[in-house]
Image (spheres, rainbow, N blue to C red):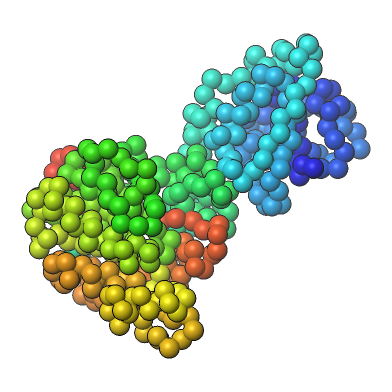
Amino acid sequence: MCDAVLLDLVHGCATCAGAAAPDGPRVFLLCGKRPWDTSSLAGRRVHVLDGGSTAECLYRFKQTVDELELSSVLVLTSPRGRGALLAYQRQLFTGVYSFEYRLTAADCPTCRSRAGSAHTDSPAEEVSEFLQLLPALRGHVSVLRSTLIPDCFGHGFSTRSGGVSYIPTLSALNLFSSSRRRDPGAVVQENRRRLAVHAGFHPLPLRLVKVNHARDVWVLGKAEPESYDAMVTDRTGVVLAAPGADCMPILFADPASKVIAVAHAGWRGTLMGVAMATVENMATAFGCRVSDILVAVGPSVGACCFTLDWDQALDFSRRIHPDCVPDPESARPHVNIRLANRVLLERGGVLPEHIHDDTVTERPCVTPCTACHPEAFFSHVRDGANFGTQVGFLWIPEDGNADEAQRPL
């Protein structure tokens, strides 16, 4: 049983679609800019999607479906309409939704005449143009920057404001699309574009680590692994990004060798040593001296809000430092994963003054607790499975110096 029925009057006619519509589910008429007639649906409550492009109408359809927490959709359309709507579906929906396409009669003259004139060659372009016109939600795009990272690099840590994602836990600048969440790829791409415009880089070279919660590092130029938690490069113009929603996005920069890296460090990756694995790859692949490397730790969950099972927490005390677990006698102790990374980095030779995290008070903070600040950051701990994602990003400008807009305020 479907939750909603979408009658495609852009590529077909009301007579064919209405005759095939089952009783019961909510009915939506996809009309676009065409005139519409609901006489064949007399007695049915219908939602009319009209007055705009197909992309706009389907986006409004998605908003209603999300508001009602629906996920199963029956689409009644013409044979050619199916191909067009599948293209829009790939842009605006994820694996959370299920679509069944039921085709109307192929020999209907009205459906045949509408299919040709309504078809667009580029649904992706139409969707992108529509999304670019949407107003920013939750204020303007805002980025945190570390005063430790010099101006010869562009960098920042995103917050949740200024994007177009409207689902509460994903609003507004969600930067990662998952088949298990309701934010589609096109919306995330628009959010990334807005971040790029604000931060001063082109969105296309943005590379996001393919998280596996371990310590694998990809040195760009070598074969790309299937998954990894860190990247290293000396290439200009390539924007490296590490996601976070409680896990730490960590930026590494060597001004002497002009080498950069980013890492995603959750509690598992921290225990496995992903931060020092990143530093080691900078040294072995590009000859960086560990004492030259600067490290900025981005927004992440603090010890105030992060707990683990007792045996997992005690791994931090035994293998890293007792101070990483402030309440070891608790049944579910709190764990300071930021401190754990500092301890491991310092042991590996990174200078204490070359690490910018929440222990540093003489610089503007770039490591606030994500769970404590719902107005500014996404948090898995706080929001549950349908959480949004912010990123830490870093690049080497092609002209050798970051734009004025990149300089920390």
Residue 184 in percent (x, y) is at: 53, 43
Q: Is residue 2 visible?
A: yes
Asked whether 234 or 316 is in front, the reply is 316
Q: Find residue 278 and report its image quarter.
A: bottom left
Residue 140 is at least partly visible in this image: no
Query: Residue at horizontal 12%, vertical 60%?
Result: 290
Q: Looking at this rendering, what residue extends furthest in the right direction?
A: 43
- Determine whether, in the image, residue 387 is placed left or right of residue 204: right
Q: Residue at x 91, y 38 (%)?
A: 43
Q: Residue at x 64, y 36 (%)?
A: 58
The quadrant the C terminus occupies is bottom left
* Residue 82 x/y as whole percent: 66, 24
Q: Quadrant of the N terminus?
A: top right
Numbered marks: total: 0
Figure check: 119 above or below 260: above
Q: Nearer the viewer, residue 289 or 357?
A: 289
Location of residue 257 in the rendering, given as x and y in whole percent from the top left corner: 9, 50
Q: Is residue 275 above or below residue 41?
A: below
